[in-house]
Amino acid sequence: MGLYVRNDLRLKGQTRANAVRKDSRVVLAENFSRINNADKFDIFLSHSYLDSNEILGLKLEFEAAGFSVYVDWVVDKGLDRTKVDRQTAATLRTRLKQCRCLVYAFTENSQSSVWMPWELGYFDAFKNKVAVLPILQTSRAGFEYVGQEYLGLYPYAFHATAKGGNGSELIWVCTAPETYKQFKGWLNGQ
């Protein structure tokens, strides 16, 4: 089992941005310039904007697995994340309703986000399909995520190779101690 590590995700995001010699935010914006208000997403990626490069890597990881991902500063560039106002809340409510699940990217920056707890509470009440995805500062062998305060109420996501599989990494959700489901199965309620 492997929890996600900040530098691995950052490297993945920067590698993609460097491949086209652009900032990660520009790469994301160009990839999603065709999104409109009627689009549906598999994942609402709740995160701190301070982690934007890691979020690009995580977004690419989910997309490589076949999932569509909503990132607010990519899709709705006009949002001002520093303002807690009715317009931003209305936009986020609309987008939350367009998503099948919420993945809460937990880092040390999450605690300073004014929007992440609000997004989590709203989505949990609305659809009850939430997974916490811890992003560690450094890799720790054998480390298992137990949650912090109310985040421990939710299953958590990680990546690992399936036993007997072809060796490729898959995204998993730990729904209970020693109970794991592939992300796709969890998302589809299996």
Image (cartoon, rainbow, N blue to C red):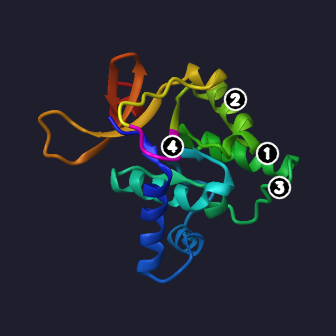
> Which one is earlier in the sequence, the residue at label 3 or at label 2?
3
The residue at the point 53 percent across, 29 percent down is: 129
Q: Tell me the element at label 3.
A: loop
Q: Which residue is mark 1?
A: 89
Question: How many discs appear?
Answer: 4
The quarter of the image holding the N terminus is top left
> Which one is earlier in the sequence, the residue at label 1 or at label 3?
3
The residue at the point 75 percent across, 65 percent down is: 78
Disc 4 packing (10 Å; few <14; some 14–19; many ≥20): some
> Which one is earlier in the sequence, the residue at label 3 or at label 4?
3
Residue most extreme to the bottom: 21
Residue 48 percent coordinates (x, y): 67, 50
> Which one is earlier in the sequence, the residue at label 1 or at label 2?
1
Q: CA distance from mark 3 to mark 4?
A: 25 Å
Q: Amino acid at mark 2?
A: Gly
Residue 156 is at least partly visible in this image? yes
Q: Amino acid at mark 4?
A: Leu
Q: Is residue 136 magenta?
A: yes
Q: Residue 136 has which mark?
A: 4
The residue at the point 64 percent across, 28 percent down is: 126
Q: CA distance from mark 1 to mark 2?
A: 13 Å
Q: Please name which of the two marks, 1 or 3, marks the residue nearer to the observer.
A: 3
